[in-house]
Each structure stands twice: as structure tokens, then as C-alpha cells.
Image (spheres, rainbow, N blue to C red):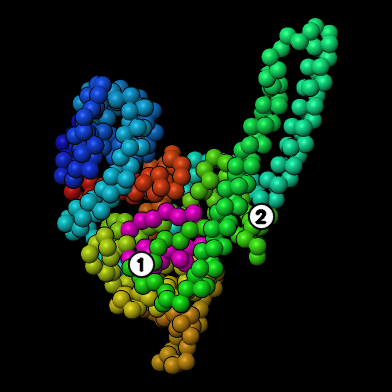
């Protein structure tokens, strides 16, 4: 295998990473067979995500068949359950490697922060949208299944009475017909989902009311949390009929994409213009984009230690706050105020800008100038290829893990391996 191969690069890279948090886990008293070396396990996972093989089963198989993974594993063949368990146990520590890899990219001169672009993409959850049910249907199904259970129990009692009369009381009396077991199990799941949806709706209503009653000033940019999807509620704090919950991954949501709807998550990335390095990333279950801009900008500054000079975003991110907040930090925002048709040409801008323009009008005018057009035209070329490389070239179109916390860890793995590929390409 060539010296400059990605597998050799990753083996060298992981030796430079601080894996203390992972090693500490193995410094405690261990019982049973000694574990596989953490450095090798980290390298296996990073290489797998780099080449679009995140499945632990496929990684194990390729330690037999693929030269690169045989080199990384040193001829060992960790069982897929061990690879999966290693990722589960150390997911938070693996996610923290994002900043370490980003720092290496900065040291290599790949991050300039002269211009960054923010965008989001919807990634499918490890759950089917057909496993989601609305609150209205939950209530209907609960009533129907309750009646069905009552009917099946009545039938079972009649059958038992008839058999006892014919053959004598020879049954224990606790057996349940298979159909009744299935119906009761489905009724239990629907009741649990309905109760969870009601509790989430109640919490959303309480948080909304607390925000209204709070006289404190709005949080500063450093305190702005990532947004989360709020269950639509009635005035009484109950879920609306259209409020939904997924039985397989309750944290995921139905989200609109360019070609329909998916059960998934909203994955965000801030990309540096110089070499398409991802400088900040996040995952939420909030479908709209505007509330992501300020938290992602804060993460960019925290990760890189300095502020970008220009920020680009499409019309999905426009709001007055998203224009004014970056300006307070000395960042020059270029955020589209609306979608423009391909055959539509905005009128030319001449003269000095009027002093009475609204924030939206001022931004629209700025993007209509020759200089503004030139800057904003870079947006697509900066950020959209990154999602193409992740989803098309590497095939990472669906999360393997379930639940918000685990999905965030996996998205960190996906984005940090994108940066590893860029770093490898720059140093090869």
C-alpha cells in the first residue's frame, strides 16, 4: 500500500490526537479478555466514515477483504459488536475530535476565515416516516384498539367457558390468544407515545409561557442555544391533532426536502471558503433554518478562536436579527432576502442608499450591487459541494444511530472525517 494512502495518513493522524478521555475508560479495573487497542478502534471508525463505510458489520467484513482496513487493524478482526459498542461508549469523546482535527487544519493553513458560508441539509433518521403517527390518529387508534381488546377478551372468555363445559377445567386461565397479545402490545405502544407527546406539548407550553413572563433581557449570542422543534399545542397545552411522534426515533421529525418529505434531522454546517473546511456543525430537529445562524456563528468563533470577516447564507436564514447580530461583532453578512428566479434580473443599483431603508431593504440593495453579487455568488460553490461530497461521494445519506444526542455525535464524526479528507488531500 502506498505511503501516502489515506489509511496510513489516518494511523499517523490518530497518534497526534488527544484520546485521553477514551484511554481513561480502560484504566479502570477490567475483567475478561483485554480490549482491542483504542487507537486502532478510533482509526477503524474514522477510516470507515471517510470512505462511506460506517456500518460496524461492513467494517468487520472489510478487515478480512480490504487491504487498507487490514493495515489499520494490524491483521486483527474486531467483531462488529465490539466496533459498535466502542462507538456507543465513546461517542461523545469521538465527537470532541472535531475541534482537534479543525485545529490541525488551521495549523496547516487550510482555514482563512475571510469568508464562510452557512447551510443545512436534511438527513434521514434511522426510522421510517410511516412509523410516525399524528395525535388525532393516536386517539382514534387507541379507541379502536380498546374496543378490539374488549371484544377479543369477551370472545376468549366464551371460548374458555365452552371448552370447560365440554372438557372440564383443564386450562391455567392465563393464556392469551396471539391476536389479543398483538393488539394489546400495539395499544400499549400507542398509549406510551400519546402520553409522551402530551408531556412534550405541556413542557413546550410551559417554556413558552415562562419566556413571556420573563422580564430579563434576551440572551446574548454566547448564551443562545440551538433551536429545537416545538410540538404545536392548543391553548390548553395539549398537542394539536396534526402533532406527530415517531415510534422508532421519537426525536426525529417529518421534514420537507426538495423531493418530498423525510423522517429526519436538520444538519447544519459552516464552511470556510478557502478549502471547504467545516468550521462548525450542529444537528437539530427544527426544520426551519433561521434560528440556527447565531448559535452556529458562536460555535465558529469558539472552535476557531477568531471571527470570520464575511458570512454568507441563503434566504432560509434571513431575519433582521440574523443581519444585525453579526454586524455587532464586526462580521459582514450577505444573506438573501428571498428566492430569485433564474431568469429574473434585479434592477441595477445606482447612487447612495436612502437613509430610511429597512434592514431587509438594505440587505436586498446590498446584494443587488455589483460587489454584493460577486460576494454572494460564492455561496453555492463554498457550502453546497460539501453536502454533495458527504451524501453522494461517501454515501452518508442516513444516520445509523437514533436519538438526538447520538445523532449529534454521528454528525460530528461525519463532518470531522470530511475535514480529515481535506487535510489528507492538502498534505498528500
When asked about the image quadrant of residue 79, the answer is top left
Residue 228, given in percent of the width and then of the height, sits at: 48, 58
Q: Report the quarter where the N terminus lies.
A: top left
Sequence order check: which comes first, mark 2 or mark 1? 1
Q: Is residue 209 magenta?
A: no
Residue 277, given in percent of the width and then of the height, sits at: 29, 56
For the point 22% across and 51% down, the residue is 100
Disc 1: CA contacts within 10 A as few (<14), some (14-19) or many (>=20) = few
The dot on residue 356 is none
For the residue pair 61 and 342, the one nearer the viewer reads as: 61
Q: Mark 2 or mark 1: which is in front?
A: 1
Q: Is residue 329 left or right of residue 178?
A: left
Query: Disc count in the image?
Result: 2
For the point 43% across and 63% down, the residue is 292
Q: Is residue 398 left or right of residue 111?
A: right
Part of the protein shown in magenta:
280-298
Residue 384's place in the image compared with 94, above or below, is below
For the residue pair 172 and 30, the one nearer the viewer reads as: 172
The dot on residue 223 is 1
Report the residue marked by disc 2.
242
- The alpha-carbon separation of the residues under discs 2 and 1 comes to 32 Å
Secondary element at image label 1: helix
For the point 57% across and 45% down, the residue is 246
Residue 234's place in the image compared with 407, above or below, is below
Q: Report the quarter where the C terminus lies.
A: top left
For the residue pair 172 and 414, the one nearer the viewer reads as: 172
Residue 29's place in the image compared with 12, above or below, is above
Q: Is residue 287 magenta?
A: yes
The answer to whether residue 337 is visible is yes
The answer to whether residue 334 is visible is no
Residue 80's place in the image compared with 133, above or below, is above
Amino acid at each position: 500500500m502506498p505511503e501516502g494512502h489515506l489509511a496510513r495518513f489516518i494511523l499517523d493522524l490518530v497518534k497526534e490526537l488527544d484520546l485521553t478521555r477514551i484511554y481513561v475508560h480502560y484504566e479502570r479495573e477490567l475483567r475478561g479478555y483485554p480490549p482491542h487497542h483504542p487507537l486502532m478502534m478510533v482509526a477503524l471508525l474514522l477510516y470507515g466514515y471517510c470512505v462511506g463505510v460506517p456500518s460496524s458489520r461492513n467494517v468487520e467484513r472489510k478487515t478480512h477483504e480490504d487491504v487498507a482496513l487490514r493495515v489499520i487493524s494490524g491483521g486483527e478482526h474486531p467483531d462488529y459488536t465490539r466496533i459498535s459498542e466502542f462507538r456507543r461508549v465513546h461517542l461523545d469523546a469521538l465527537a470532541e475530535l472535531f475541534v482537534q482535527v479543525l485545529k490541525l487544519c488551521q495549523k496547516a493553513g487550510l482555514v482563512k476565515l475571510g469568508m464562510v458560508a452557512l447551510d443545512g441539509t436534511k438527513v434521514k433518521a434511522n426510522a421510517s416516516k410511516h412509523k410516525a403517527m399524528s395525535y388525532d390518529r393516536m386517539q382514534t387508534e387507541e379507541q379502536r384498539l380498546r374496543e378490539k381488546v374488549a371484544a377479543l377478551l369477551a370472545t376468549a372468555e366464551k371460548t374458555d367457558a365452552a371448552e370447560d363445559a365440554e372438557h372440564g377445567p383443564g386450562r391455567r386461565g392465563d393464556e392469551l390468544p396471539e391476536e389479543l397479545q398483538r393488539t394489546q402490545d400495539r395499544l400499549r405502544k400507542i398509549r406510551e407515545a400519546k402520553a409522551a407527546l402530551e408531556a412534550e406539548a405541556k413542557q413546550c407550553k410551559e417554556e413558552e409561557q415562562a419566556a413571556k413572563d420573563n422580564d430579563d433581557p434576551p440572551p446574548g449570542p454566547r448564551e443562545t442555544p440551538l433551536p429545537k422543534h416545538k410540538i404545536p399545542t392548543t391553548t390548553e397545552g395539549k398537542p394539536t391533532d396534526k402533532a406527530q411522534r415517531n415510534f422508532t426515533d421519537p426525536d426525529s421529525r417529518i421534514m420537507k426536502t426538495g423531493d418530498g418529505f423525510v423522517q429526519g434531522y436538520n444538519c447544519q454546517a459552516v464552511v470556510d471558503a478557502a478549502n471547504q473546511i467545516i468550521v462548525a456543525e450542529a444537528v437539530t430537529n427544527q426544520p426551519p433554518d433561521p434560528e440556527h445562524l447565531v448559535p452556529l456563528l458562536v460555535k465558529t468563533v469558539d472552535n476557531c478562536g477568531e471571527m470570520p470577516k464575511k458570512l454568507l447564507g441563503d434566504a432560509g436564514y434571513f431575519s433582521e436579527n440574523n443581519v444585525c447580530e453579526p454586524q455587532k461583532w464586526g462580521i459582514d453578512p450577505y444573506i438573501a432576502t428571498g428566492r430569485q428566479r433564474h431568469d429574473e434580473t434585479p434592477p441595477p443599483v445606482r447612487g447612495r442608499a436612502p437613509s430610511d431603508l429597512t434592514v431587509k431593504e438594505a440587505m436586498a440593495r446590498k446584494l443587488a450591487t455589483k460587489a454584493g453579487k460577486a460576494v454572494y455568488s460564492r455561496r453555492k460553490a463554498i457550502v453546497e459541494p460539501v453536502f454533495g461530497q458527504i451524501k453522494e461521494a461517501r454515501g452518508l445519506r442516513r444516520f445509523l444511530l437514533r436519538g438526538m444526542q447520538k445523532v449529534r455525535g454521528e454528525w460530528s464524526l461525519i463532518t470531522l472525517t470530511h475535514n480529515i479528507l481535506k487535510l489528507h488531500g492538502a498534505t498528500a
